[in-house]
Structure formats: structure tokens, C-alpha cells
Image (cartoon, rainbow, N blue to C red):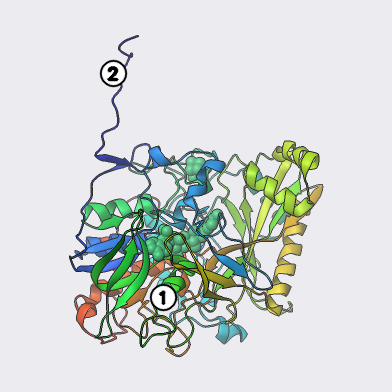
Amino acid sequence: MKTPLFGSFKAPATSRHALGPMQQIDVPMRRFRDTDEVDYLIVGCGSAGGVLLQRLSRAGFRVVALEAGPFWDTERDWVSDESGSHKLYWEDPRITGGTDPLAFGANNSGKGVGGGSVHWAAFTPRFHPSDFEVHTRDGLGADWPIRYETLHPYYEQLELEMPVAGPAYFPWGHPHGYPYGPHPMGGVGNALIKGCTSLGIPVSIGGPVAILSGSRAERPHCIYRGYCIQGCKVGAKASTLITHVPDAIAQGGEVREYSMAHRIELGKDGRVSGVHYFDRDGASWFQRAKAVIVAGYAIETPRLLLNSACPGHENGLANSSDTVGRFLMAQAGNVILGRFDDPVRMYKAPPAHALTEQFYETDPRNDFVRGFAIQTVGPLPIAFARQMVSAKRAWGWGLRREMMDYNHWASLGLLGEILPWPDNRVTLSQERDQFGIRVPHIYFNLHDNDHKLIKAAKDKTMQVMHAAGATEVVQEARYAHLVGAARMGSDPRTSVVDKFGRTHDIANLFVCDGSILPTQGSANPGLTIQALAARTADYLIAQGDTIFSSGKRDQTEPRMRKDLAPPDTWGHGVPYLK
Ligand SMILES: Cc1cc2nc3c(=O)[nH]c(=O)nc-3n(C[C@H](O)[C@H](O)[C@H](O)COP(=O)(O)OP(=O)(O)OC[C@H]3O[C@@H](n4cnc5c(N)ncnc54)[C@H](O)[C@@H]3O)c2cc1C
Ligand code: SF4
């Protein structure tokens, strides 16, 4: 057949960049010259960086985001396949150590536009009011320089921008509802509900998760095929790649892909003047900027600050307090696997779709402070195989037998709050990466409170799995969600940045990403990271040009700029239940 039934096939236009089956943007985008002095240079275009780029571009600033990874074209670059998605992760060398070392690679940070929001499962619970005053309440950890009430409007805002689907009434922390209705349950969610309800534990069904339960503009609703952590080619799962970056580009912002920042330049006047970076061929460039915002994630942010040491700042930039790299946190993320007689088919749903926060708060009956959440997780076969190797020492024929049984297993993840400790830390090793940049060395040790909390969380999650009817229950110990290592605080002697992300030491250098969190609760951090980014952007916009010339530190809370949200944010979903 020379002419197909519906007309001849056309090659995709080279001026279009696909962000989903229907969502596209025009390329090429605006390109600043290195000799241009842009207003803001953002290092990293991930969860926080994407929101910052969008807000600042829409406010009329000249903004470039340097991104170490690619600017994904989802139709060209992504596959709905577990082994084909490793390029989404940051897999450059990192050295791990300490008594309880963290694993790196697929289970921590992302690389490429959208950062970790491309491969996140998209669970989006808010932090609880107690998270902001852990030290005051429990005598351990730290207090935040802001309270829940400060972030509350930004939580509501970002829940609309992603948007988040969930129950009409979420009972924990500050009770609230969600703008999009809950998702239907998969087999793992059913197990969580059954286990929790038979033990009298309340459970949240169908979210909160930043996955569309109904179509919106150019984004289709979820089709429940379970490739969320592989990027979601469908475009139902929110990532800043598809929620914020398109608007940033339409407003004249630039994303410079394959641009690895390796040193922030400090001028003689004590202000930063730009960033040195390598392109994909290893050529070195310098982008001038009036102000710099580092948004590279909890490992790469301290690494860049430490690698930017210079005369007068021998311990790294913004490190007069010696806290850059310290107070790194991960959440305990043990996976509890249960075998059921009936098939569960845990791949047939987004991994994130049900949870309980019933054990989130400090309980005086416990011998530890703070708490944990229990959530659905839905490992695909390769991840499941790894878990069976770890949990059951399965190998060879034994592993093959477990794999053939995959459809009968359910898995629940606990999310346990590990406190910030000064010895949990990112430093620089003497080894160098492919660009010749010193690689991060990460030390991680669990402390007494952490050990006790993890044990209690593991026991409770196993109890839930048994109560759901599992005939065999095993577990894999692991961590999730790195944050901290450039924490915010009011005291320049014990923190790196102030409550707006401005470094205490350098007036036009900011940090805005997961690294600024003083504590982490047992909620997934992505929503909080993006809410903080929107608030920092509002602050910068309210301060105007003073950021570029003055050392004055105005601590006035900015006016919230809902008008600068991406178009189509309002008027969808259902009104909030107040
Ligand atoms: C498997 C998995 C599932 C997860 N699921 C959830 C979830 O369900 N809910 C949730 O809230 N969180 C989840 N997370 C965590 C979440 O993805 C991260 O907390 C969040 O993305 C961190 O945001 P960030 O802005 O700090 O960094 P990122 O989003 O990682 O962005 C940092 C960006 O900076 C770039 N970069 C770094 N260094 C440089 C440099 N020197 N030069 C240029 N660019 C640089 C990186 O390439 C990256 O794109 C998950 C994480 C993983 C690994
Ligand atoms: S389950 Fe839904 S959100 Fe996850 S990859 Fe499939 S369509 Fe996307």
C-alpha cells in the first residue's frame, strides 16, 4: 500500500520537543550568551530548580538553569521498561561510607530536566505542623526558622499546580482535602487497607499523589500501568519537566542541558559573579550572573559549595558555620514484602496510592521520638528480584522460583524519620569524576533514636502485612529520600541559609532544594521542596533589584504571587474542604 489509509506518514517536526503524547513545546528556546550577565543562574533544573525557573522567568527576570543532564524529549528518550530507564538517575561516582552506608544510583537523585521529579513515585503528603518545631517539642533534631502556617498557602498552591489527587479529607497533621479525586486501588493498596482496617488503623486511599485522576489540558489521566518511577511516558504523573519548565521556556527562560557546574566564582567584592561549568564534550565555560541559586539536590549542592573553596573561603563557599555537608538525612525506607495465596499483581497501579500516617507523631509510650508512615510501593520485576536477593538470599534456581511467583507478592514501604546528626555528612574525596571534579564522600551512621524507630516501624509494617492475610512476610532494609546538608536556620553559626534560602555568608548566593531542610518528618519531601521553591521565588520577586546590589537582608514575608503560577492552574479540580 503506497498511501496509508489515513494519509502519508510525516516525520515529526524538528522544531517540536515532545513532553508527552500530546504536550509539546517549540524549540529552539531562547539562548543567552555566556558574556550576558543574566539576573539569576540556577544550578540544577529539578524539583526546586524547575519551579524557580518558571516563577522568575514569568516575573520578567533573565534566567538560565544549568542542568547536568539532558532536556528529555519523552517520545524520543524514554521507554516504558525497567532496565531502559537507568539514564534517569544520577549514576556518576559517589563514595559511600560510615557504619550504615547509603546506597546510591537508582534509589536517590535524578539527572536531567525535572531531576528527581521525573522518577519519583509522586506521593505528595504535606509535612505536619510538628515537623517545624521538632527540637522544641522533643529536645532532639532542630526547629525550622518558619512554621507550618508559613508554608500552608504554598502547599495548597503546589497541590493545584501539579495537581495532587487524594481523598476529600486527609486526617493527619493539618487536616485538609485535595483538588482531584482519589485513584482506584491496586492490589498493594487493597492489602494495606485490609491490614490496617483489621488492626483499627485509619488509612488514606487513592493518594495524596501527584498523578492525574482526570485529564487536564494536554495531559491525559493515569492509565494504571505502573511505570511511574520510569518517568511516565503518558504524562499523567507530575514532574517539573511537564508542569513548570514549559511555561518557563514560553516566558523566555533558558534551560542549558548537559551543563555540569563545578565552581561558583566569588568576586573581590564578596559577591558571586557567575558559575563555571563543563559542557557534554568537557569544554569549560563561564556564565555571568547577578545572583546564583544552587538547586542541585542534597549531595550535589554541598559538593558544589565545597568545590568552590577559594582564598578567604578555604572550607568552601557559605561555610563559615562548618555546616555545609553536615546534617544530611535519609528516611528509613525498609520494604516489607508479603506473599498472598491470591494474585496481587502489584505492577497494575501507580506504586504510590495509599498510606497511613497514624504513627507519624512522637508517642510518649515509645522509647524514641518522632515516627513513621506506611505506604504502598509496587516494585517492578527487576527491583523485586533485587529485594528477594536481599530479603531471602534467593539466588539461582531459588531466585527464579521467587520471580515466577511475582504476581502473588505485595510490598509496603515504611518511611521513618531519621534525625539530623552533624556526623552524617558530605565531604570531598580525593577521587575525581569524568570531568576531573572531586567526587562527594558520604558518611552515614544511625543513632540510638534512629535504630529504635526503625525497629518499631518495621515490626508494625510486618504486623499490617500479616493482618492483610500474607502467608509469608520478609523485609529489605533500605533508605529513601536524601535531604539536608545545607540547612536553613536563623543562626548563621549553625546553619547555611536563612529562611528564604539566602546564604548567611554571601548576599547574592542562594540554596533552594532538599538540602535546606532542617528535619524531614516521615512525609515524602517533594511537595515541601517545591512549596519552598515557590516561596523563595516570591521573596526574590518582592525584593526586586536589591538582591543584585545590596547586602541588606530584609526578612519580611513576601506577598504570595498566585498570578505567577503556570496557566491553567486554577479552575480545575474541586474546591478545597476548609
Ligand atoms: C525512586 C524514587 C522515588 C521517589 N519518590 C518520591 C515520592 O513519591 N514523593 C516525594 O516527595 N519524593 C520522592 N522522591 C524524592 C524526590 O524525587 C526528591 O526529594 C526531589 O526530587 C529532590 O528535589 P531537589 O530539587 O532537591 O533535587 P532534584 O530534583 O534531584 O534536582 C536536582 C537537579 O540538579 C541537577 N544537578 C545537580 N548537580 C548539578 C551541577 N553541578 N550542575 C548542573 N546540574 C546539576 C541534577 O541533574 C538534577 O536535575 C523519590 C526519589 C526516588 C529516587
Ligand atoms: S501508572 Fe499512571 S502515572 Fe504511573 S506511569 Fe502509568 S500512567 Fe503514568
Residue 521 seen: no
- Residue 251 vs 215, above or below: the answer is below
Residue type, label 1:
Leu
Residue 139 in the image: above or below residue 465: below
Q: Earlier in the sequence, mark 2 or mark 1?
A: 2
Q: Where does label 2 land, which residue?
A: 8
Q: Quadrant of residue 306?
A: bottom left
Q: CA distance from mark 2 to mark 1?
A: 54 Å
Q: Is residue 210 left or right of residue 538?
A: right
Mark identifier at residue 305? 1
Q: Can you say which quadrant of the picture contains the C terminus?
A: bottom left
Query: Tag 2: Cα neighbours inside 10 Å, few (<14), some, or many (≥20)?
Result: few
Residue plotted at (78% across, 51% down): 393
Determine if residue 518 is in view. yes
**Residue 576 percent across, percent down from the top left:** 42, 59
Percent of width and height locating residue 291: 26, 74
* Front position in the image: 327 or 189: 327
